[in-house]
Image (cartoon, coloured by chain):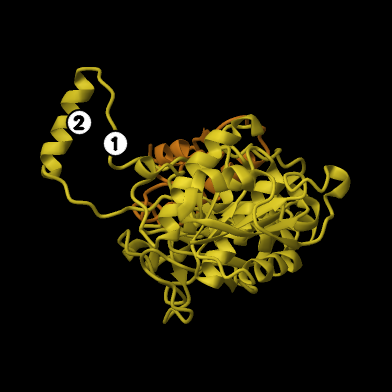
Amino acid sequence: MRVVHYVNQFFAGIGGEDQANAPPQARPGPVGPGVALQQALGVDAEIVGTVICGDGRFADHEEDTAPAVLALIESFAPDVVVAGPAFSAGRYGLACGRVCRDVERLQGRPAVTAMHPENAAVELYRGDVVIVPTAAAALGMQDAVTALARVTLKLGRGEALGPASVDGYLPRGRRLNARTDASASARALDMLLTRLRGEPFTTEVPLPRYDRVTPPTAIADATRMRLALVTEAGLVPPGNPDRLEWVRATKWLKYPLGAKRDLEAGDYEVVHGGYDAAFAMQDPDRLLPLDAARELERLGEIGALLDDYYVTCGNHGILSQMATHAREIAIDLRAQNVDAVLLVAT
Amino acid sequence: MTSLASVALKVGANRIVRGSRFSHPCGQPGLTPDAERAWRLALVRAAVSALRTTVTEPTLFEPEGSPA
């Protein structure tokens, strides 16, 4: 089994922050932590090459650097790629995450990295990349390479990983099918009884964790505020020209309000499988309160309304997909100097 | 702006204005058209007021006349 290892300039022994701009480069065989990793891998796997890049270089020129790193990795024709461990190093973690994601997506080869669960790269890459949890600092190197080696061997043999808790990586938020002896109702009652006895239990359906966002500062002067109207209510022009999905939407859209002062029945339809749109179809202002917002604009109580409104469908929205919509809409709004958003949720 | 304020609080939306019903958060079909428009104006005013209010955690604003 051929293994290629990605490390940063520090772990490769090139230097510290003064060498953070080191360009992508390759060396045969294991380097730095690769020596310990090779020992943990044993005789079934060989680190045939090490690819190195400075953390600053990767972070500042990611779009040019990632393909260069990938080409070097590919030159060794690996069966599996290992990046890190990055511990709690932020830029190194981001580079490891990007390298692993690209190796899997673009080269179709398995990849694994390792870092501390609170490394910023975890939130960004945990859904796409297998990440083995480590201690915060390099003192935990031995444990990290032992755990990494186990996953590396499994991936390199082309085996599917089991659940995160069994195979020792951070949950990717995927559901895996598995056979069990007891029916769901029996398992649920067992879990309830265990809980009532005050004993520890493991849920089969972990609830999503929601981000906490620091509240933005209050608007100082609403009379100069540029306000945008956004909704997940699935309000679209008749005929749904851009084919917004009525469930699990994969897109968001924006449509001009133009000089409209009021949303008229018949000018819109609702694409949303989560509610009865009869009342909203009678008067779409019941979803997107344009008449009221225009009135406040006329009275000078708000500065101006953005010309477009933004829409997606929140019905059965997948959290990560909705978060992506939100980020993209926010970027678009910021580019138009919007100060505040009124988001109507059905 | 939502009728499902408890959900919005739980997921951590910071400024929440309680709307009417989930199928028409900014509408009250039971009112006369004029009364409904007046209520909607008050609702959006409450949203502007919420935007002008400093908050430190998910906070629910209850506009006058919105069904609880």
Residue positioned 63% across, 38% down in the render: A87
- The answer to whether residue A252 is left or right of residue A166 is right
Rendered colour, chain A: yellow
Tell me, yes or no, whether dots 1 and 2 are on the same chain: yes
Picture quadrant of residue A60: bottom right
Is B52 placed left or right of A132 in the picture? right
Total marks in image: 2
Question: Mark 2 falls on what kind of element?
Answer: helix
Name, please, the residue furthest toward the top: A198
> What residue did someone put label 1 on?
A203
Q: Amino acid at mark 2?
A: Met
Q: SS class of the residue under badge 1?
A: loop
Say whether residue A78 is visible: yes
Kindly indicate whether the residue at mark 2 contacts the one at mark 1 (C-beta within 8 angstroms).
yes
Q: Which residue is mark 2?
A: A191
Instruction: Tell me if mark 2 has few (under 14), some (14-19) or many (20+) residues whose alpha carbon lies within 10 angstroms of its own.
Output: some
Residue at x 74%, y 55% (from the top left corner): A303
